[in-house]
Image (cartoon, grey):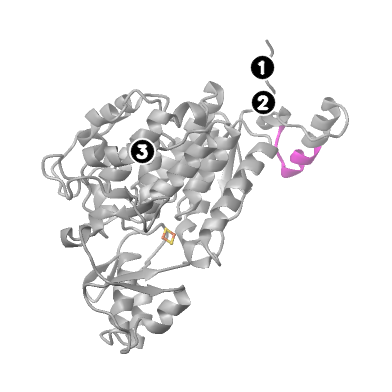
Amino acid sequence: MTDSPSGMKKGLANYGDADFSLFLRKAFIKAMGYSDSALDRPIVGITNTYSGYNACHRNVPDLIEAIKRGVMLAGGLPIEFPIVSMHESFSHPTSMFLRNLMAMDAEEMIRAQPMDSVVLIGGCDKTVPALLMGAASVDLPAILEVTGPMMTGSYRGEKLGACTDCRRFWAMHRAGEVSEAETEEISGKLAPGAGTCMVMGTASTMALVSEALGMMLPGGAAIPAVAADRLRHAEATGARAVAIAAEKLRPSEIMTEAAFANALRVLQAIGGSTNGLIHLTAIAGRLGISLDFATFNRIGAETPVLVDLKPSGQHYMEDLEKAGGLAPVLREIEDLLDTGCRTVSGKTLREDIADAPAPWPQDVVRTMADPIHQGGGIRILGGNLAPKGAVIKQAAATPALLKHAGRAVVFDSLQDLAERIDSPDLDVGPDDVLVLRNA
Ligand code: FES
């Protein structure tokens, strides 16, 4: 049996016979200044998801440099290539459409260009699922590096986190407690640097569940974007990208049904974003795996919320990193995980957990005996209001809200909500349920 083509010989364009197509390809790539010896090495593609609109990916140029160093130290040839960039605040009308565009872009560019493995750099909410969706469809050896969370900001002595505090301050502004001038000052403090939102929003959630899924080297989810450790993790990722090319370790061998069950359990244990479920469903779908909502609810019933991060708790991602990152979470729920799953490290999840630094006293990741919330963070609901199901983050609700009867006060659109919500004439009371339709 002959090996399938690798490196520059992969996926030749159609210019007649294969030798001519390769000759032509080499002629053009040599214009970049590569030597024949460089071009004979395994090629590691590196997705560049940075743009001037994307502060969450501001450190991508530095990450690319560190990943390239890792690739070259391991004997590969790194080649970066752009795909669309996407930031939540710059994605009209909604970043969800663009998630699917990014997934298609990643898939087609990975498939179209010659590479033996690919490093996926993502971070901002929709980017990590988009990249994993694209990589899953191509099923070329792939490894994820996230940009990492932002450090917290500070305003007049108070710690701030995007975007839990964005909404809190805006509500105070609407209530007349924070002036226009103060909102300008606060907007300069909420997102104080490079990286993703540092609360347990979608970006933090997707970083943690992707590590649990096995697509990122251990310890990578919570390292802050500006930390030297982030660059070291990127360098190690580059080196590992060369190894998975040789091993031909494919995403479909890592993202198995059992690995998704692990990711769903971690989603519950971290009190992750409801979007995590939507994205995991989409990634699994690319591999022909369908996530079962009854199973998800059962996993939730068995798995308490252990991570004390805003918005449901009190800490931030930098605190989770100081507490050991995802490792203490995995250790605490190890008996509930399928630790035989293989990860991109080349080892099993069991071995990755055993290799993590020994635990130390901390108060960010709680124990199973003393959780933040009994029962998982998220639950799928059914009923006449949502015949096809609805997702609720029960960990973020006070117990009184979990069983509630009240009048529905309905807004038909975001514009309707904005126009009427602050009106003194709005007929609304503390026990009413606000309903936003067509969002
Ligand atoms: Fe990019 Fe929050 S806006 S992670």
Mostly what secondary structure, the magenta segment?
helix
At 20% from the left and 36% from the top, the residue drawn is: 332
The part of the chain drawn in magenta is 27-35
Front residue of 122/231: it is 122
Distance (Cα) linking label 2 and label 1: 8 Å
| Amino acid found under the numbered disc labelled 1 | Asp
The quadrant where residue 164 appears: bottom left
What residue would you read off at disc 1? 3
Q: Is residue 213 visible?
A: yes
Residue 49 falls inside the magenta stretch: no
At 28% from the left and 84% from the top, the residue drawn is: 175
What residue would you read off at disc 3? 263
**Lateral position of residue 164 relative to residue 232, left or right:** left
What residue would you read off at disc 2? 6
The quadrant where residue 368 appears: top left
Which quarter is ligand 1 in? Answer: bottom left
